[in-house]
Amino acid sequence: MIAAAAWVCLLSPLAAVLAIALGGNRLPRRTAGYLATGSTAVSFVAAVAALIATLGHTASHRQTVSTAFGLIETNAFKINLNLLVDPLSLVMMLVVSGVGSLIIAYSIGYMKGEDEERRYFAYIAFFVFSMLLLVESANFFLLLVGWGLVGLSSYLLIGFWQERPSAIAAAKKAFIINAVGDSAMALALFLLIQHTHTLDFGGVFNQAAALGANTWLINLVAAGLLVGALAKSAQIPLHTWLPDAMEGPTPVSALIHAATMVTAGVYLIVRTHPLFEQAPHVQQTAAGLGAATLLAAGAIALVQTDIKRVIAYSTMSQIGYMFLAAGIGAYSAAMFHLVTHAFFKALLFLAAGVIIHALGGEQDMRKMGGLRKRMPRTYIAMLIGTGALVGIPPLAGFFSKDAILATAVSGGAYGKVLFAAGIAGVLLTALYSFRLIFLVFSGEESELVRKSMAKHRGGEGPRWMMVPVATLALLAVVGGWIQIAGLWHPFSSFLDAVAPAFGAEPSAAREWLLSAVSLGVVLGGLWIAWAIYSAHSQKAPRTPAVLVEKLYFDRAYDLAFYRPAVWLAQRLGSWFERPVIERSGDEIGLGALIGGRFSAAIQNGLARSYVLLVAAGVSVIVLLFLVLR
Amino acid sequence: MLGPAIAWYLVVGGAIFAIGAAGVMLRRNPLIMLLSLELMLNGANLVLIAFARRHGSLDGQVFALAVMAVAAAEVVVGLGLVVAMARRKIELDVDLLSRLRK
Amino acid sequence: MWIVWFAAAGACVGSAVAVVALRNALFSALALIGNLISLAVFYLLLSAEFAAAAQVLIYAGAVMVMFLFVIAYVGWDLDIAWTGGPSWQTLGGVVAAAALLAELVVVIVLGAANDLRHANHVSVNFGDPASIGRIFLSNHLLAFEVISIVLLVAAIGGVILGTQRRRERTGGIR
């Protein structure tokens, strides 16, 4: 029963992809959208069914593995096509299919009238399939397959508007950086195969202690996995692709680059936590990088002018929180934040999409202003999202973020450093989030707003767009109530079977104290933001060059990697490719001509010459016989 | 009664064969070419008969007689061609008959 | 024995070269007759009496006479070029023939050590007509018949080749 649900959940979006691809132009555009949405909804229903069935089992028996057939079978080593349904994968399945179906439904309204609607829906359904494969796989091999396919879907969807060179460049950048991560992961998997002779999760984790005895080995494996996670989740230093990925359509940004794909790195670390626990240095590095990212991204978000880029940096920052949590062993806290983040980040992106749609494609916040009166429902949605993001009770982010901070502060000296970073991050989050709200919604209506609103009749957006936004807003409100510190914790007990917390557990009192502190910080940030950014302020805020240049990461990578590669390619082209390869094509032709001319000379029509040729041939053959005897 | 070893006879037979081959390849007069062809056949005959003596079996001589008969038949046809060429006043130069080129 | 052998061998090879090298077709044909007769001597040395007789009677006697007839009819035109053709033909011909000869000699020399040293003992009746006839009519009967057909075909062919002119003159098949 669970197995069947898992397979239905996985294959339903794939069926939609095939249907749309085979239908081609004969398929009406709307139908492509309905197929994609419907299939993802079916996946969600299947995931819910699997959840209910799994809850029927006792806590220690909640793991189901379902095997389809063997993929690679050798004497020493076997990989099967098998799926795993356990609490961790269920959480991810529900998030991916649930939030995914809402976002795809939203796309029906957002992408209406696009030239290539069907291609979009095929790609996005393919993405859902790949992500589900990633989270449902029961061995590292399928996880890597899903990992790669997700990267591919991201590339296809970022570059969806193929006419835009900036979109194509962004897609390439995302893919290349992800390829770096994929290679590191593959190397780690090779090491695993060599030493454990299996890639099944169960098999590998059972041998984790044995692997841990060899410190070099386990550190390399964990480092490889970490690099893969860093690339996929856009953490420092492999983060530069995420802001550029905003070139894709807004629903894509919501689904892939906020709610699901970028969280795959967090999922990976939580899933492979037995390995990370054996390599504590790597795990602490993960936490440190998460902290660094959350600070850096928060700071850069302060000077962004594009509304989607602000939200993108916000995503980067929040995932930093999740990495921080996973790095200190607070796995269920990390997953909890993943779930709530999916809700409110998708909400923010979709609401921003409504605004962009209403303003005819404009994304520059400096040209916006005063939308509060014109788009009240969107305003409320964005407020809810922002409140959830910064952590205002009783909205979702409050509960999840504070769990992370509390665990950090309980964890020794390093933990206190992380905690400091986390609190600073809370301040930054409040600053840039409310900056966005003030710039976009408050004050007087800008020129652009006036013109766009005049063209609009009636509601703020089509129904297909507003309903998912409303649903997500509701989820952002109630989503956090599944885990309230000290009172009830069904979420963490659900996950404990798979990923028990590692390290110190904070007490309930401490958690509440910290919540109060962070709430204070949030309100302080709100007040500062109001002072600087709202319409009442007089002076324009400063924008240091360092932040505008995104901490010079892009420039550094350009100098270190891109320019040498281009130089090398050009040198190879002129030294090798043109003289050797292209000319050899010509020379082969010349050779054929010369050979032909030679052969023609033999055909002179004289019988005597033919006799000569026969005699010559016979003597050669006899010679060969003599020599080879 | 034999004289030299069989090998010597074979060398002579081979020499006649090779000289005949050279003649076929070098001369342009069709009559001379036919004569050279006869030389080659005779060389082969000598080899056959030498081996017949070596093995004490008459099969080689039988083969040689067959070769002689076939050579005679072939000469008939060849000379008939030459006579036909001469009747039509075609010049007796093999190199001028190069229709095989096409 | 050896004297006879060497004399015959010298005549053989010398006449062979003469066949190929002489300009006058008549002299070439006469040289070939000399070659055939020296070969007959060889056959006698090899106890192939019937073959020797056939060689002289049929080959030298009938075939070469035919040749001489035709040469007489056609004429031994001394103006025809000795050799020529493409530049590689002459040299190539010589080289190929020399190569064939060399290879043959090598093979024979290689085999001379073992195989060709002894000859089997043969009876007095080895090469005489009775034995040959017996074999032709028993073991090699098929060859015998086929040869006769070949000769028949050749005769018919000769007649056809020779009567072309008469048909043309009368204009039609008689």
Image: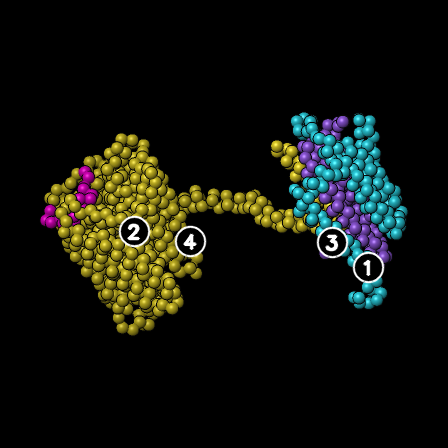
Chain colours: A yellow, B purple, C cyan
Q: Which residues are magenta?
A: A485-503
Whole-number angstrom distance, CA of label 1 to CA of label 4: 91 Å
Task: Tell which circle, 1 or 3, labels the residue nearer the N-terminal end.
Answer: 3
Please identify, in this view, whether the residue under mark 2 or under mark 1 is nearer the observer. 1
* Quarter of the figure that contains the N terminus of chain C: top right
Whole-number angstrom distance, CA of label 2 to CA of label 3: 85 Å
Residue at image x 56%, y 43%?
Answer: A575
Residue underneath mark 3: C153
Residue underneath mark 4: A169
Residue underneath mark 2: A133
Which subunit holds the residue at mark 3?
Answer: C
Relative depth, front residue between A255 and A348: A255
Q: Amino acid at mark 3?
A: Val
* Quarter of the figure that contains the C terminus of chain C: bottom right
Q: Using the image, tell me which numbered label, if any, was put on residue C163.
A: 1
Q: Using the image, tell me which numbered label, if any, was put on residue C89.
A: none
Does residue A123 appear anywhere in the picture? Answer: yes
> Left of A599 or right of it: where is A143?
left
Which subunit holds the residue at mark 1?
Answer: C
For mark 1, give the secondary structure.
loop
| Residue C71: percent from left, percent from top | 86, 49
